[in-house]
Amino acid sequence: MTYPAQFRYTKEHEWVSLEGNKARIGITQHAQGELGDIVFAELPAPETQLEKGDTLATLESVKAVSDVYAPMSGKVVEVNEAVEDSPETVNEDPHGKGWLVVIEVANPAQVGGLLDAGAYEKYLSDE
């Protein structure tokens, strides 16, 4: 699996796609594979303030319930309702239609703490 080069990644297997002062966030191909079939997604309400490391969403699969953590601080400005209605979208297209939320970034410098695609792939191979 080659991970999109324009994204940034966390060691907790979230991805971030920066679009100006907004960050689209989802889970990686690796994470959805580990979770298995996702059957329920609980996403935050718009306007929710998140600090880096806060629980951003909860994904329930046939195997387990997993928290998704905010890779950056900010305010939720958009929630992917398609994922709430059809959680399997995360399995089908985790780096595309299966995104979870968009936040308005409070501290753009936090992107410096995220991994680029090459570093994330190396992290996975070392795990």
Image (tube, rainbow, N blue to C red):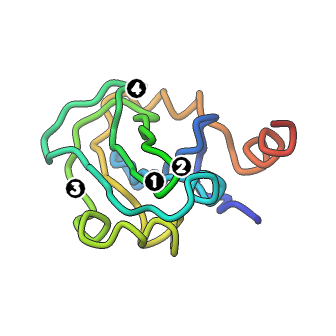
Discs 3, 4 touching: Cβ within 8 Å = no
| Residue behind mark 1 | 26
Q: Residues within 10 Å of mark 3 (few under 14, many from 20)?
A: some
Spatial CA distance of label 3 from label 2 is 16 Å
Q: Please identify the quarter of the rendering in which residue 41 is found.
A: bottom left
| Residue holding disc 2 | 15
Q: Is residue 127 shown left or right of residue 102?
A: right
Marker disc for residue 78: 3
Disc 3 marks a residue whose amino acid type is Glu
Kind of residue at disc 4: Lys
Label 1 – label 3 distance at C-alpha: 13 Å
Residue 44: quadrant of the picture:
top left
At numbered mark 1, what does the secondary structure look like: helix, strand or loop? strand
Q: Give the SS element for disc 3.
A: strand
Image x and y of residue 102, in percent? 31, 52
Q: Nearer the viewer, residue 71 or 105?
A: 71
Examine the rendered structure and indicate whether residue 17 appears above or below residue 49.
below
Q: Which residue is mark 4?
A: 52
